[in-house]
Image: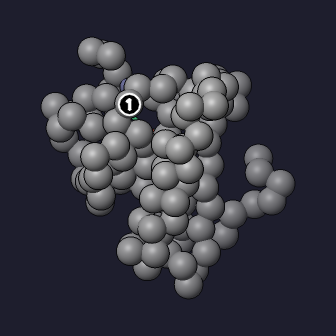
Amino acid sequence: MGNCIFCRIASGEIPSKKVLETEDIVAFHDVSPQAPRHILVIPRRHIEKLADLTGPDAALMGKLLVTATEVARATGMEADGYRLVINNGERAGQSVFHIHIHLLSGRDFQWPPG
Ligand code: 5GP
Ligand code: ZN
């Protein structure tokens, strides 16, 4: 996926402030943070969006979710609380079509979301 910005971040071709790298997952700071702490957790494998997932993706997506909680713990978010968000499709706010979990913390969040 040559021109996907998150594939290029995962490979290191585009610089980012990484907080964790494993064989199949990368976490890095969002360039335009929507909270005092805002980290993106992505699989290295290019999957466009949540709606494209199928059965065999379950293990990877489970790992992605667990990794997000580990990043939250490692960066001291647990005491404060945090929110995970996955936007699916433009109308839901997705702007980068490589699946990612937003990990947000450090302020109050609205419920229901805006
Ligand atoms: P989405 O709107 O698709 O749910 O989230 C995409 C996120 O990626 C946005 O919060 C945006 O700020 C972030 N983003 C877009 N381009 C870059 C980039 O080049 N580097 C980093 N670190 N974050 C990016
Ligand atoms: Zn990609």
Of helix, strand and loop, which one carries label 1? loop
Q: At 49% across and 52% down in the image, what residue appears?
A: 63
* Residue 38 appearing in the image: no
Residue at the limit of the structure toward the front, as seen here: 56
Residue 90 percent across, percent down from the top left: 63, 23
Q: Nearer the viewer, residue 20 or 36?
A: 20
Q: Nearer the viewer, residue 79 or 52?
A: 52
Quadrant location, the N terminus = top left
Query: What's the amino acid at mark 1?
Result: Arg
**Quadrant of res 107:** bottom right
Residue at the limit of the structure toward the top, as seen here: 2
In the image: residue 89, left or right of residue 12: right
Q: At 43% across and 49% down in the image, what residue appears?
A: 41
Mark 1 residue CB less than 8 A from any atom of ligand 2: no
**Quadrant of res 110:** bottom right
Q: Residue tagged by mark 1?
A: 45
In the image: residue 51, left or right of residue 62: right
* Residue 61 appearing in the image: yes
In the image: residue 40, left or right of residue 82: left
- Looking at the image, is 44 positioned above or below residue 41? above
Q: Nearer the viewer, residue 15 or 11?
A: 11
- Looking at the image, is 41 positioned above or below residue 104? above
Q: Nearer the viewer, residue 10 or 108?
A: 10
Protein image colouring: one colour
Residue at the limit of the structure toward the bottom, as seen here: 79
Q: At 76% across and 47% down in the image, what residue appears?
A: 114
**Quadrant of res 46:** top left
- How many C-alpha atoms fall within 10 Å of the one at disc 1: few (<14), some, or many (≥20)? some
Q: At 45% across and 59% down in the image, what residue appears?
A: 67
